[in-house]
Image: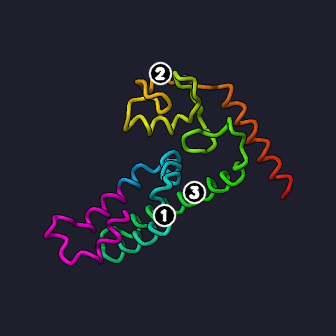
Amino acid sequence: VRACVCTCTQVATPEKYFFFPDQMLSLLTDVYVNLDSPEFIEAVAKDERSFDASLFDVCAKNLYSRGTKTEAQVRKFHDFGERANDAHIKKTHMQQLTEDAPADFRDPIMDTLMEDPVILPSGMRVDRSVISRHLLNESTDPFNRLPLTMDMLEPDTGLKERINAWVAEKLAAKRLSL
């Protein structure tokens, strides 16, 4: 989406390069709107590399002003962006609330609170989402470089329960302080 917004004004003749930003932006917004679900919204909001709430506004204005989408289609996309921004804000508040998490609750690779801890064959505990991303690029354990696949991961339900209880305590304490 960022490429479509930026390149529209920076490339004098995009068709020369077979780049059609209006068409690409229209197709990308279709993807967002058609995959609209709480899980997808959360995934978009969690993508710290590329999530920018202001881009949804800019894209919506571009789509409407260029006649690429109808007003109803633009509204759906804009609403998606607002819900993703709400999820992003909620995630940011949760990160602030849990920044003092005990070391064994934090993923050793990304230093974030684990949501779904798993045990690697090496005995290390990591968050499932972090190791899943790692395994997309390398099929080795990042701690000992031995072969590793998703089916070798063991859920750490005990640790997950302890993390969830700790988070619930933090949320309860925050509610009491308000």
Name the image quarter holding the C terminus.
Answer: bottom right
State the CA–CA distance, disc 3 to disc 2.
32 Å
In front here: 130 or 168? 130
Give the dominant element type of the magenta stretch: helix, strand or loop. Answer: helix
Residue 112: percent from left, percent from top:
61, 45
x, y percent for residue 151: 45, 22
User: In the rendered image of this protein, does residue 103 appear above or below residue 150?
Assistant: below
Q: Which residue is mark 1?
A: 52
Q: Secondary structure at mark 2?
A: helix
> Residue 86 sits in which quadrant?
bottom right
Q: Which residues lie in the magenta part?
A: 1-30
Q: Residue at x 50, y 31 (%)?
A: 143
On screen, residue 14 versus residue 48, left or right, reads left
Amino acid on which disc 2 is placed? Met
Residue at the spot of label 3: 88
- In front of the other: label 3 or label 2? 2
Left or right: 11 with respect to 6?
A: left
User: Which element type, helix, strand or loop, lies under badge 1?
Assistant: loop
Residue type pointed to by label 1: Asp
- Position in image of residue 147 (x %, y %): 40, 24
Residue type, mark 3 in image: His
Q: Is residue 36 magenta?
A: no
60 up-or-down from 39: above or below: below
| Alpha carbon distance from label 1 to label 2 | 35 Å
Q: Which mark is residue 145?
A: none
Lower position in the chain sequence, tag 1 or tag 3: 1
Determine the residue located farthest toward the front in the rendered image: 144
The question of residue 19 being in magenta is answered with yes
Residue on which disc 2 sits: 152
Q: Residues within 10 Å of mark 2 (few under 14, many from 20)?
A: few
x, y (%) of residue 50? Answer: 45, 58
Indicate the quadrant containing the N terminus: top left, top right, bottom left or bottom right: bottom left
